[in-house]
């Protein structure tokens, strides 16, 4: 397995806790953590395999740090690169745009030729709509710490087993 670049905000407590679980399951030697709030285009383009963490903010928006970072790689080809996405949302508080951040990132990556892996089932979630939904799957691992925290560890473990096969 080639080294995986795990890009997330080091300042997001819940996302960091999830990243720590993912790193433990993948093995520390296989993952390089990168704070997306300080990432450069050169750092980002230096990987072949990625895990990107994106919580959904407000009414389906990307966090500011992703909005600020993505333009730096907007003109780059992501062909030949593999991406697994995970992120949090609140299906009760924001049912009309649950984990939309995952969908935003997936669209950005696919428009530049990147491959998305790690789709997960929408079973077990209750929401009205999601930009991250494709048929009966999400484009990544959807986590709802606010309403389903007891399911998170099992979901993370299953997802990591799935993405290991892709990396």
Image: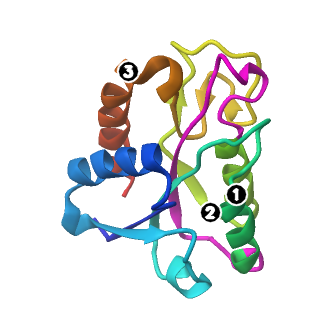
Choose between 134 and 20: the one closer to the eye.
20
Left or right: 160 in relation to 143: left
Quickly name the residue at label 1.
110
Crowd band around label 3 with a 10 angstrom C-alpha radius: few (<14), some (14–19), many (20+): few
Disc 2 to disc 3, how far (Cα)? 29 Å
Q: How many marks?
A: 3
The quadrant holding residue 126 is: top right
Disc 3 to disc 1, how far (Cα)? 29 Å
Q: Earlier in the sequence, mark 2 or mark 3?
A: 2
Quickly name the residue at label 3.
151
Crowd band around label 2 with a 10 angstrom C-alpha radius: few (<14), some (14–19), many (20+): some
Left or right: 37 in relation to 17: right
Q: Residue at x 76, y 23 (%)?
A: 129
Element type at marker 3?
Answer: helix
The magenta stretch is: 74-100
Residue 24 shows which numbered tag? none
Choose between 78 and 150: the one closer to the eye.
150
Choose between 152 and 2: the one closer to the eye.
152
Is 72 part of what is drawn in magenta?
no
């Amino acid at each position: 397995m080639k080294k995986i670049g795990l890009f997330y905000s080091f300042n997001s407590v819940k996302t960091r806790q999830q990243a720590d679980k993912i790193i433990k399951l993948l093995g520390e030697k296989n993952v390089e953590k990168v704070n997306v709030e300080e990432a450069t285009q050169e750092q980002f383009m230096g990987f072949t395999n990625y895990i990107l963490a994106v919580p959904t903010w407000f009414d389906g928006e990307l966090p500011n740090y992703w909005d600020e970072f993505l333009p730096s790689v907007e003109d780059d080809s992501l062909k030949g690169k593999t991406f697994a996405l995970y992120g949090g949302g609140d299906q009760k508080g924001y049912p009309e745009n649950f984990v939309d951040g995952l969908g935003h990132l997936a669209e950005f990556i696919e428009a530049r030729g990147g491959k998305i892996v790690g789709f997960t089932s929408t079973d077990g979630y209750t929401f009205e709509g999601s930009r991250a939904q494709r048929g009966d799957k999400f484009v990544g691992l959807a986590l709802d710490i606010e309403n389903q925290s007891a399911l998170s560890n099992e979901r993370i473990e299953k997802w990591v087993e799935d993405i290991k096969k892709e990396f």
